[in-house]
Image (tube, coloured by chain):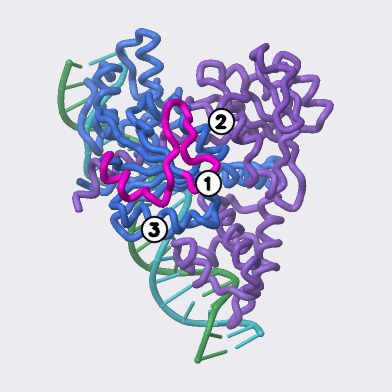
Chain colours: A purple, B blue, C cyan, D green
Amino acid sequence: MERISTATISRLSQYYRTLERLIERKIQTVSSDEIAEIDSVTSAQVRKDLSFFGSFGRRGLGYDTTDLKNNIGTILGLDKIWNVALIGVGNIGRALVDYGEFKKQGFIIKLLFDSDPEKIGKKINELLILPFSDIQTYLKAENIQIAIVAVPARVAQNVVNTLVESDIRAILNFAPISLKVPSGIMIKNENMAIELEALSFYLKNKLKK
Amino acid sequence: MERISTATISRLSQYYRTLERLIERKIQTVSSDEIAEIDSVTSAQVRKDLSFFGSFGRRGLGYDTTDLKNNIGTILGLDKIWNVALIGVGNIGRALVDYGEFKKQGFIIKLLFDSDPEKIGKKINELLILPFSDIQTYLKAENIQIAIVAVPARVAQNVVNTLVESDIRAILNFAPISLKVPSGIMIKNENMAIELEALSFYLKNKLKK
DNA sequence: AATTGTGAACCTCTTCACAGCT
DNA sequence: AGCTGTGAAGAGGTTCACAATT
């Protein structure tokens, strides 16, 4: 397949949500113009993003909302269940266990890990918190494909190294630090402070309105 | 000022964290090559990013870590305190109240709002949960510059509209929906599921390794 | 000798504009 | 007539490569 930019992928996720909402509202057909308007992009962008994967519309008519949603779902891999392990059940970790948007899209948090003896053995929503020291055994037994890392920055690289040794190939990292992974392993960083800092920059420099 | 890309700004945030860590380790000088290596970018990228704002290094020698950290801090607006209001104290909202990375960078959550009568009047970390219906009065009294929205998708646009009417100019949105704001208002979206979906896409399509 | 700062070259992503289909 | 799908043009972002400086 041709190389697809991450920008395209994250816009597809947006369109997917927009389509979910249109379907809820019983809207059956939508044009690239309408999607573009809702998601604040251009209609050419919507069509180009889709064109990397096929032709999903009908000229003159637009797209069938359910069809297009299903097609994008398949592209993104949302047509299957992904088993997820969550490492670190502090503030952020606990919030993620309950985050409905994950479950809805087929990402099931199946295992929780922590290193704190105070937490190990306790439960969050029926899920037992397991000792991080035994993670390799558990990961293999449960067929986990994705790991979410929500541990403090100073231990994040070690945690990631252990995950890589356990054959995890995709990691979502919430620790505010750049992590190194071997090529072939996907890592995405979610740093809430970085977004706030972008706002702070624009407030300070741009908006002399 | 020349238009600066958001990519540059978020890399500056990364460099800033890298410098914090170098300073902790008592390292006084760093080259663009070393920063680049840590943050997985090219050294030309580091130098170019900085060059939009000035010359902070010394040829042949590199950058003074403390100097550069302070300079980037000033660029990003981290040299001042930002007062933040948080709307929605569900799972995500509660986690954010305790998120150390915000406080450390000068973002102080001063007001909490919710619409749930069960929550209003309760406290999280000494902070009283206030009724969202009265938000306009509170925002004006407390000089709030930034709002974090952590409410369900279906009410997010209404919340944002109210914020805009209350003269909030910067919003960090955690609701998984595209929101409309008038031009001049900054909005940044933080959608954790979108990052997971990118991982899912790459697992499914790319990594036939 | 080492490393910055930067114009120019390069590459990637976005938008244009229109042929082609319904 | 209306809207998609897409090659070509344009805009924007990244990397190269080297003169300038310590």
Please tell me which residue is depicted at 29% across the width and 42% down the height of the picture: B145
Q: Is residue B180 above or below residue B7?
A: below
Question: What's the residue at 27%, 19% (across, down)?
Answer: B63
Read off the chain for label 3.
Answer: B
Q: CA distance from mark 2 to mark 3?
A: 27 Å
Q: Chain under label 1?
A: B
Q: Which residue is mark 2?
A: A92
Q: Nearer the viewer, residue B35 or A21?
A: A21
Placement of the C terminus of chain B among the 4 image quadrants: top right
Residue A101 can be seen in this image: yes
In the image: residue A65, left or right of residue B94: right
- Dot 2: few (<14), some (14–19), or many (≥20) neighbours within 10 Å? many
Drawn side of residue A151 relative to residue B75, left or right: right
Say if D3 sits above or below A85 in the image: below
| Residue visible at 45% across and 66% down in the picture | A42
Q: Which residues are magenta?
A: B114-142
Q: Is residue A166 shown in magenta?
A: no
Report which residue position mark 3 lands on.
Answer: B161
Q: Which of label 2 and label 3 is nearer to you?
A: 3
